[in-house]
Image: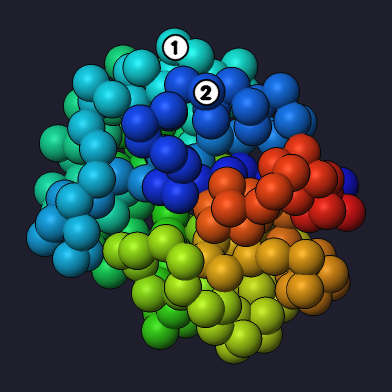
Amino acid sequence: MMKVAPSILSADFGNLQRDIEEICQSGCDLVHVDVMDGHFVPNLTIGPVVVSAVAACATKPLDIHLMVENNTFFVELFAPLKPEYISFHIEEEKHPHRLIQKIRSLGIKPAIVLNPHTPPEAIEYLLQDLDMVLLMSVNPGFGGQIFIDSVIKKASCLNEMRNRLNPDCLIEVDGGVNDQNIQLLKDAGVDVVVAGSYVFKHENRKTAIESLQI
């Protein structure tokens, strides 16, 4: 079954605890947290004080997605919250092997993110050391964007590489996911989807989550 990680970027931050408790009670698998620094992407989101409050009320594991410069600094900042995953962008990291080892040494599962233009081959020699690869299906920085269709082919290519090099590594897709493209993603080998607007703007969040868990 497809795992669903609602992105709290689309939640109501005035009622953040309520929204997080609702998605957890509605059967989500992970809580996706987008951390943006205003440098790597043109947006600024949340720091460890807010994320610690998220962790305190979430009954599902955290999936922290770093969209930042100076990845090591942010890994050390968020590691005490003990998320399930911390993912960082390959486009920003000069020493990815070193950072993967650091994340794992902290008891957290390491993941790498690929922007829409970055080919899967960019991480071929890293794949054996990863627990998850996150494919962006929108340009990172803002919620509510339109799904980039070419990620389907990209996910299929990554799936072939994953099956050959590290079958236990998960494939996650983030951006524009909904009930219209979920079957295509599943057929391409995707294991986890991040859904922000689709879940939080839906009139029934439980229904929205279940529609993606195919």
Task: Look at 40% across and 84% down and name the residue there.
Answer: 117
Colour scheme used in the picture?
rainbow
Residue 75 in the image: state x and y as whole percent: 26, 34
Q: Quadrant of the C terminus?
A: bottom right
Is there a contact, CB below 8 Å, between mark 2 and mark 1? no
On screen, 181 above or below 79?
below
Q: Is residue 19 visible?
A: yes
Task: Look at 13% across and 57% down and name the residue there.
Answer: 38
Residue under label 2, please give it. Answer: 18
On screen, 76 above or below 73?
above
Viewer-proximal residue among 204 and 128? 204
Whichever of labels 2 and 1 marks the residue nearer the N terminus, that label is 2
Q: Is residue 105 visible?
A: no
Mark 1 closeness class: few <14, some 14–19, many ≥20 residues within 10 Å: few
- Quadrant of the rendered image containing residue 59: top right
The amino acid beneath tag 1 is: Ala
Task: Look at 24% across and 45% down and name the residue there.
Answer: 45
Mark 2 closeness class: few <14, some 14–19, many ≥20 residues within 10 Å: few
* Residue that lies at the very extreme toward the front in this rendered image: 203
Residue under label 1, please give it. Answer: 56
